[in-house]
Amino acid sequence: MFVTLKPMEVIIDTWSLLTDAGIAGILLLLAKMLRTNVQLLQRLFIPTALLAGLMGLILGRSGFGLVNLSEMASTYSGLLICIVFAAIGLITKFPKFDDLIHRTGRLWAFNQIIILGQWIVGVGFGVLIIPIIFPDLSPAFGLIMPAGFMGGHGTAAGLGDTLATLGWEDALSLGLTSATFGVFLAVLGGMLIINICARLGLLKDVSRFEELDEHVRRGLTPAEHRDSVGDETVASSSIHVFTFHISLIAGVTFIGYLLANLANQNLTFISVPVFACCFLVGCITRFVVQKLGFFEHFDERLISSTASSATDFLIFFGISSIQLAVLISNALPFAVMMAIGILFCVFLVIFVAPRVLGADWVDRAIFSWGWMTGTVALGILLLRVCDPKNKSHVLDDYAISYVPGSVADIILISFVPSFVMMGYGLPVLGALLAAIAAVLLIFWVFIRPVSHR
């Protein structure tokens, strides 16, 4: 009785996966062609995956119905974010304490203020505003802002999956919409900030769009500027290098999935996200493999490339699966939350950045605007406009300060949604305020007295 149905289900699912992958591939290629040839899209620095996702949304079920992804497509984001975090865990290097405090302490402190501050605003919105103005909303509604702005589409997908398991099904669509809005905010707001700073004389080496290299504008890299994505670390006669690395990431992701299931079966008071477990397993795997002296046979660039590819597909499927009906029904509170998020990010750049980042705050603040509202890649693009000669060394410092920030972010994503959904919003808000107070104390006592290069 069970033999006849299961093979058919597998065949249908397999071809559904191929259909979705084929549609994604075609739209990504079409979006790349548009991005390469339409100057308006180049000026806006629109990522190809985001453009393809918007095409999928407009042409899909929520739009004209010309290109229909399967019902499974909305579930891909949850799996893809696990792959991304598994890979991130495998390439994460924890910085030395001396480098963190003395070299990049100011940027680390600012990053922590951004991360904790956005979560404080989000939780505060749910605890203080929602019960009064929007009593029918989920108490976790405010979390879509930090998840979408600072976290991007990946974090929004992870948070959406977590909140869906806790009973709020609309979280995924709203979180991904927040992340999409954040990308446009990062670019348009970032360019406005750059122009204002240039007119005030705070920036001297700003590049106009026409002055950027053609391959930067169009996104097609000529031969003389190409970099290798990795080395062959194993003999192809034994196993292909891509198979070798994909096997590692797949194994880590699977173990993370098993660990999350085990944790959720035994921890009934909280929902542990799968992607957080994948990150943890990735970090542990790296440590163990390094101790065994075997990690030199894995290329971090190939692992990073796998994560980047998964992110592109995550963005496509995430945006394509947005339910416009959900957004329309929550339009007013969503607009209020986005407005509050914008004002807070502007406050961070104008008032907090000069006081925390020191004398060379402008370039760092503009880069931080890009990643606090959109993605790190957009922060790099903005930095390339305001600091074309890389005089500020922002990326070097960010690479060191990134890891503690990412770990803090993962902890927040793992625990805050569950506690807020269970009605513990006020204690969570208090804990976040205590955490940001601790960061400010560390900055004032240990970091501020140290001169920043």
Image (tube, rainbow, N blue to C red):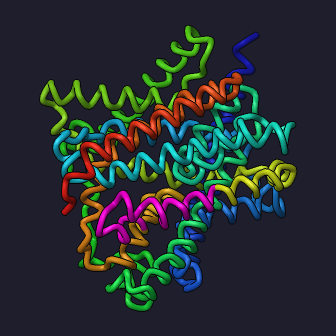
Place of residue 425 in the rendered image (x, y in percent of width and height, measured from the top left): 66, 29
> Measured from the top left, where is residue 332 in percent x and y?
83, 55
| Camera-nearest residue between 260 and 14 | 260
Q: Up-down: is 384 above or below 307?
A: below
Magenta segment boundaries in residue numbering: 341-365
The residue sitting at 57% across, 63% down in the picture is 183
Q: Which residue is drawn at 60% across and 22% down?
A: 271
- Residue found at x 22% / y 44%: 236
Asked if one can make out residue 152 in the rendered structure from this viewpoint, the answer is yes
Q: Is residue 218 above or below residue 254?
A: below
Residue 320, image quadrant: bottom right
Reply yes or no: does residue 433 show up in magenta.
no
Is residue 359 located in the magenta-colored stretch of the structure?
A: yes
189, 352: nearer the viewer: 352
Residue 15 seen in render: no
**Main secondary-structure element of the magenta-colored stretch:** helix
- Towards the viewer: 159 or 254: 159
Q: Is residue 435 above or below residue 33?
A: above
Please report the residue visible at 72 percent of the width from the left and 12 percent of the height from the top.
Answer: 2
Q: Where is residue 394 in the image (x, y as percent from the top left)?
A: 29, 63
Residue 109: x %, y % from top left: 36, 48
Depth check: give the residue in front, 42 or 417.
417
Quadrant where the N terminus sits is: top right
